[in-house]
């Protein structure tokens, strides 16, 4: 989603990864279109639920591509990244947009609350969530998540400086996946909703909690905010660690020379693998066949990442696809605002929309929201100060 810290500005882009960034941005929009449809009382069914679950590869792919680009120069650049320089660069690229988009979405919440004759005080019941954990909107948590995880680059540089061999690196990646899976199945993974559908800002400690089973017995209702933030950071680091290590594996010189020669046949095989893993995950969700969530997330993400690399080796550069890739971060940030407007307005503009099959309604809202978001972001990025502060471009 974000460019590498050390990536040259004029280096040919990985067009396949740009393409899948756009696809992932659309998948996120599908997920949130479903969320808003449910809140708005528009009909949903098993088809829409399946489409939502099929789209959950999006955030894992964004993580995989981000860490792939962050670790791209590890084996050729001996310069170590200091904590301060990493903090400064990551703050500029992630926390500055996070701050501005939090203000935008919070302002919209204030307007909505006042229009419904509600109390603004209800929006300040969980200030820690609002300030640090993306509480202004459901999707903003990704920025502090990636900000936290990006500090694993220091660990990655240390491992490279110790000349870690490929076998050991793969072993560490498998161990990190096992730890991440334990975190999930133990119920200690990061949860945006503790109680689904709750108004996160109106009820303290109802959202964005990790390690519930450890916190609650000691601090009822997760009342200690420092401990809350600490456990969220731990959960995010454990989540991001396998992405970092697998990205290091892909960028290892012995592997990289093979990925640089991947062709379209490999791309099709990798895409089929991602679809197969997604199918196994759906079977797990419907209690037909158990399948680990960590393997689903990392398997689909890195299959699609390798697929994107394979496409990049053969596809010609495209201005449209490049623009899509560059705009994907902005699309992710602005889409929830656009969807909220459309979902609110659509029943008034199209009063008979409820008679359409729910999956058609979802795809219609998602497509219009995606195109609108892309057009707005693409044009706003031409304004330097907006591009820098809202989209890190």
Image (cartoon, rainbow, N blue to C red):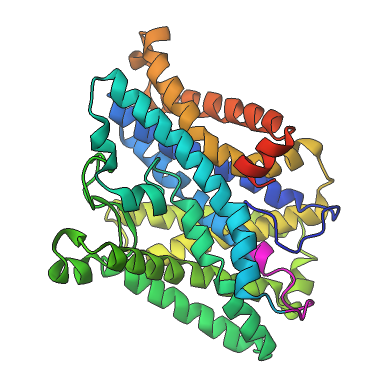
Residue 264 vs 331, above or below: the answer is: below
Instruction: Judge from the rendering whether residue 61 lies leftward or rightward of residue 53; answer left or right.
Output: right
Q: Residue at x 34, y 24 (%)?
A: 112
Instruction: Provide residue 159's location: percent of width, then percent of height.
Output: 62, 85
Residue 113 vs 67, above or below: the answer is: above
Asked where in the image residue 200 lies, by quadrant, the reply is top left
Residue 133 shows in the view:
no
Instruction: Judge from the rendering whether residue 312 lies leftward or rightward of residue 282; answer left or right.
Output: right
Q: How many marks?
A: 0
Q: Residue at x 52, y 59 (%)?
A: 146
Predominant SS of the magenta segment: loop
Q: Residue at x 49, y 67 (%)?
A: 240
Instruction: Provide residue 162's location: percent of width, then percent of height.
Output: 66, 91
Residue 277 falls within the magenta-colored stretch: no
Residue 76 vs 1, above or below: the answer is: below
Residue 191 shows in the view:
yes
Query: Which stretch appears magenta?
Result: 68-79
Instruction: Provide residue 257's location: percent of width, then percent of height.
Output: 79, 73
Residue 75 falls within the magenta-colored stretch: yes
| Quadrant in which the C terminus appears | top right
Q: Residue at x 33, y 73 (%)?
A: 182
Instruction: Provide residue 138's location: percent of width, then percent of height.
Output: 39, 43
């Amino acid at each position: 989603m974000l460019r590498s810290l050390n990536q040259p500005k004029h280096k040919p882009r990985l067009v396949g990864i740009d393409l899948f960034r756009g696809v992932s941005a659309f998948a996120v929009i599908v997920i949130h279109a479903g969320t808003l449809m449910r809140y708005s009382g528009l009909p949903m069914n098993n088809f829409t639920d399946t489409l939502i679950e099929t789209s959950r590869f999006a955030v894992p792919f964004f993580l995989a591509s981000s860490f792939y680009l962050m670790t791209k120069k590890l084996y050729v650049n001996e310069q170590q990244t200091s904590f301060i320089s990493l903090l400064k660069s990551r703050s500029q690229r992630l926390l500055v947009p996070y701050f501005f988009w939090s203000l935008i979405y919070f302002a919209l919440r204030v307007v909505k609350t006042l229009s419904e004759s509600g109390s603004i005080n209800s929006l300040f019941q969980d200030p820690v969530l609002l300030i640090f954990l993306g509480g202004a909107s459901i999707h903003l948590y990704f920025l502090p998540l990636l900000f936290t995880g990006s500090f694993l680059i220091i660990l990655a540089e240390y491992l490279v400086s110790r000349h870690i061999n490929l076998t050991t690196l793969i072993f560490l990646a498998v161990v990190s996946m096992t730890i991440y899976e334990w975190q999930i199945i133990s119920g200690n993974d990061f949860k945006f909703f503790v109680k689904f559908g709750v108004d996160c800002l109106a009820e303290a400690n109802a959202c964005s909690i990790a390690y519930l089973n450890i916190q609650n017995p000691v601090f009822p209702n997760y009342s200690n905010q420092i401990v809350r933030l600490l456990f969220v950071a731990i959960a995010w680091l454990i989540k991001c660690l396998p992405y970092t290590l697998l990205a290091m594996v892909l960028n290892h010189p012995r592997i990289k020379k093979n990925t640089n020669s991947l062709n379209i046949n490999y791309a099709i095989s990798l895409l089929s693998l991602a679809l197969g893993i997604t199918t196994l995950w759906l079977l797990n969700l419907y209690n037909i066949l158990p399948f680990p969530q960590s393997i689903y997330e990392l398997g689909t993400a890195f299959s699609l990442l390798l697929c994107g690399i394979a496409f990049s080796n053969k596809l010609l550069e495209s201005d449209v696809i490049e623009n899509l890739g560059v705009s994907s971060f902005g699309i992710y940030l602005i889409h929830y605002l656009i969807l909220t407007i459309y979902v609110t307005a659509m029943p008034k503009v199209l009063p008979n929309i409820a008679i359409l099959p729910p999956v058609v309604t979802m795809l219609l809202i998602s497509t219009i929201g995606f195109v609108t978001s892309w057009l707005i972001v693409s044009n706003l990025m031409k304004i330097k100060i907006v591009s820098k502060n809202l989209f890190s471009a």
